[in-house]
Amino acid sequence: MKAVVLSAVNKLAIAEVEKPKLGTKECLIKVLACGICGTDRHIYHGEYPSAKPVILGHEFGGVIEEVGPSSKFKVGQVVSVDPNIVCGTCPDCVAGRTAFCPDLTALGVNINGGLAEYVLTPDSQIYPVKGDLNPLHLAFIEPLACSIRGLDLANLKSGEKVAVLGGGVIGLLVVQLAKLAGASEIVLITRQKFRRDVALKIGATRVIDPNSEDVNTAVTNMDVVFECAGAIETFKQAQKISRRGGSVIVLGLTASDATLEVNPFNIVVNELRIQGSFLNPLTQGRAAELVESGKLNLDILISKVIDLAGVQAILDAPPAEGDIKYIACP
Amino acid sequence: MKAAVITGIGKVAIENVPDPTPGERDVIVKVASVGICGTDLHILEGEFAPTLPIIPGHEMAGKVVAVGKGVKEIKIGDLVAVDPSLHCGECFYCRRARGNLCENWNALGVSYPGAAAEFLKTPVKNCHILPKGVDVFEAALIEPLSCAIRGYDVLPRVPGSHYLIYGSGTMGLMMAELAKRNGAASVSIVDINEAKLETARILGIDYATSDVKTLNQPRGWDVVIDCTGVAKAIQEALSHVMPGGTFLQFGVANEKAKVEIEPFWIYNKEITIAGSMAVLHTFDRAVDLFSSGVLNPKVMISDRFALDDYEAALTAFKSGKGRKIIITPNGNSI
């Protein structure tokens, strides 16, 4: 079969590899769609640890081609896959903090992922969806599950005001989740005009271009601020634009050695809560159901649909102006 | 090995059964202490276990005497408390972080062989190493404590709240101790059994009475917890929830029991009625809290029986005398 194989840092190829052999409690999935994520670019450039060689791709779903003898799934089922595999037996897993499992391995990072014609997936990671789901929407379930984790932690209440910093896939999914949660105002802050226009179509009540307006004065008193850009500048803005007693939910990934100064006095007198949100611990099922429900506008987030041969060019270049989500259909 | 076996409804026997052998990721525990709980009586009456015969015992601690080939995190000689929960990890509820509502729910001592035996086989993930200073002969109390903590995970836990608890048995007393730890302004406990009320007084519970009308709390209590499972007590308990307050159903009632509520009252007084079921990500915290001395085991444990006297222990439990009854299947040393 064909697969996108990372053999070393900055070394990627479309390779012909052997179709994987099925174990007992797993399924062989024919990949219908696999999203390309910023993390893939980080892995490609050696900025995020991964196995090598490894087949990339962790935002995917497909149709079950073969099932192991003790699998509970059936050939032909359309399924979404949670790429993050945890041990289930360590103290963190036992305490319900599965995202912190020290043995966490991920399809497309540590073991072969979805940028291939076929991928082996353990039963534990598989979430069936309805058979007539638009296959491209399978690629959104994993990033949506991460966004839902952020909403869970935000404890957003009906009528509250929300700001979202960053107009990538996560930011634009969070805009839609905030709308579903009943936010009275949703402000999206991003440099790219195209993304601002998309945001206005899917639930943002106001958009801000940080190049032409001072974010800290244009946006104030937000109940919940979602930092989805992963930059120090936006992290600072998030603290400024939240109201006293507000929350900052951090979904964006900054460089691992980046630091910034905070004012502890202000954290106390403003009762500011800064809360990180990591991965998708046990939110994949709800994400799959929400995608199935059709309540989200996902088509507007798709910039380009490519085949496996097109992946390298996408990863070689930074995202083009106006582009949001690239999806590979192997 | 020797084991207590529920062979049929209402029937218990002491039998010789094959020694358990560990699978790849299993541990064999030499049982030091196993508690008797109301659930054991339900099992004896055929209410919980899908298949008899079964070795009961789901509140347990002991020493590791054998480990499977794939076990690295625990070694022979470790003293452990064992979480009896066997959640499948794959069903709808498990994958929504609600494993205590597992659609394929199983538990050691309920549907798999339990600890009323000389040895217990358990998956390694269920074993929690006891911190130094914890007496393994008292550590059977950790499992009921982990259920009590689940109850508090469900409750709002607002410091300065007044708590009213129905039932002064071991669960009521544990709920009362946790109320103190959660910043209660006052803790009151109601029971019809004077001896059980006396235990509450020994533990320093603010008010212990058989008649709630003697307590001066005109608006009712912020939190009312039923630990009796008795419809009549639940009905009375509900009437004492303060407007804006929370009622927690913790005691296991008869499946067919019914109480009356007024929907208008729930609406008009913003009453919350909640339930709490078994253990959910609370066992590790129960180990830590137990180690910190949240319970006084000398008071909580009233009687100890040898494994041969398992039936006598059940009879003593049924009589309502005493507090937690512990079986010591391997005597006083392991």
Image (spheres, coloured by chain):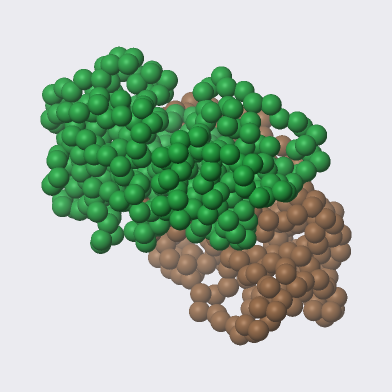
Q: What colour do you see for chain B? A: green
A259 w.r.t. A86: above or below: below
Residue at 43%, 40% in the rendered image: B196
Residue at 38%, 18% in the rendered image: B45
B247 w.r.t. B77: above or below: above
Q: Nearer the viewer, residue A10 or B158?
A: B158
Q: Nearer the viewer, residue B102 or A47?
A: B102
Label the brown chain with its letter: A
B111 w.r.t. A188: above or below: above
> x and y percent of residue B304 in the render?
24, 39
> x and y percent of residue B240 in the render?
67, 41
Residue at 81%, 41% in the rendered image: B268
> x and y percent of residue A98 in the render?
46, 53
Question: Does residue B280 appear left or right of residue A264 in this picture?
Answer: left
Q: Nearer the viewer, residue B280 or B262?
A: B262
B96 w.r.t. A131: above or below: below
Residue B186: quarter of image: bottom right
Question: Does residue A227 appear left or right of residue B168 in this picture?
Answer: right
